Image (cartoon, helix red, strand yellow):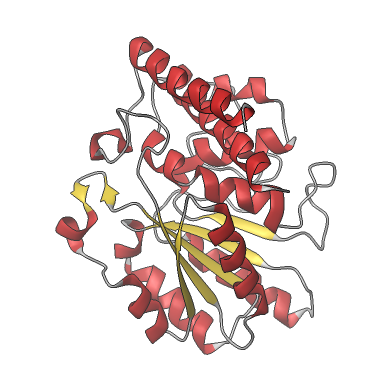
Amino acid sequence: MNNLELAKIANEVRKGILTGVHSAKAGHPGGSLSAADIFTFLYFEEMNVDPKEPKKEDRDRFVLSKGHTAPGLYATLAAKGFFPTEDLTTLRKIGSYLQGHPDMKHIPGVDMSSGSLGQGISAAVGMALGAKMDNKNFRVYTLLGDGEIQEGQVWEAAMFAGHRELDNLCVIVDNNGLQIDGNVADVCSPYPIDKKFEAFNFHVINVDAHDFDALRAAFKEARETKGMPTAIIANSIKGKGVSFMEGIADWHGKAPNDEEFKIAMADLEKVGAELCQK
């Protein structure tokens, strides 16, 4: 898939994020928007997944460790065809299968229930180890937040993955620099993130999270790296694509009102129109 096609899909994913969060009047748009290009690249180019066979044994696995950005995952799964896009408006509503955090029992395409920060990477490490023990060739991907990696369990999992040389594991850190309480560096700095993962025997790649060529090269390098897991530090912009949300910590966990939603969707419609001219 070429970059223009990916950009168009990512723009639709961002629309889906805003539609779901606005309808729910709750949720986490900022980190979902910053990771939209990563979600898009994973599901539309990188991973071996099939919405017609969501449980096929040889599929690649994905764990959303920062589970609160479920709106981003759901919008991507819908765009891929795992369930109808119209269902995004049921986000967080009573009776909906699209809960505030991913639920592997009820949502097609979700490989692991997540939401308690710091725990998703441990599940991903377990999946990767299981694949090695069973001589399976699938790869395991997990997306963490830069605020999330303040959690200690993340580093226990990283130590184990590095020790076991799990080269079928790819950890992605959405490094948008902001968390619910403000700047990640001010709340409890995890920097330098790359050096920390290197210390746990990871191959580390720093990348622009919004550059599809850079993402393509990074994931290719990860696949070709043997004898150690890979950590991709994806430098991103919180609220990417929406003018008044970009780089603003307040949009970590609140929904846009009707007027804000209209402005945000207009921003994305403009981007979509520009992409169609290319």
Q: Is residue 120 left or right of residue 141?
A: left
Residue 225 lies, with reference to residue 272, above or below; the image says below
Q: So how many labels did they put on this image?
A: 0
Q: Which residue is farthest front? A: 278
Q: Assign the C terminus to one quadrant of the image.
A: top right
Task: Identify the residue at image location x=67%, y=33%.
Answer: 78
Task: Identify the residue at image location x=70%, y=48%.
Answer: 2
Residue 5 shows up from this direction: yes
Q: Position of residue 76 (x, y in %)?
A: 62, 39
Q: Position of residue 224 (x, y in %)?
A: 67, 79
Task: Identify the residue at image location x=66%, y=25%.
Answer: 85
Give the quarter of the image for residue 30: top left
Q: Position of residue 151 (x, y in %)?
A: 32, 64
Of residues 191 and 102, the one nearer the viewer is 191
Of residues 224 and 187, the one nearer the viewer is 224
Residue 21 lies, with reference to residue 210, above or below; the image says above
Residue 28 shows up from this direction: no
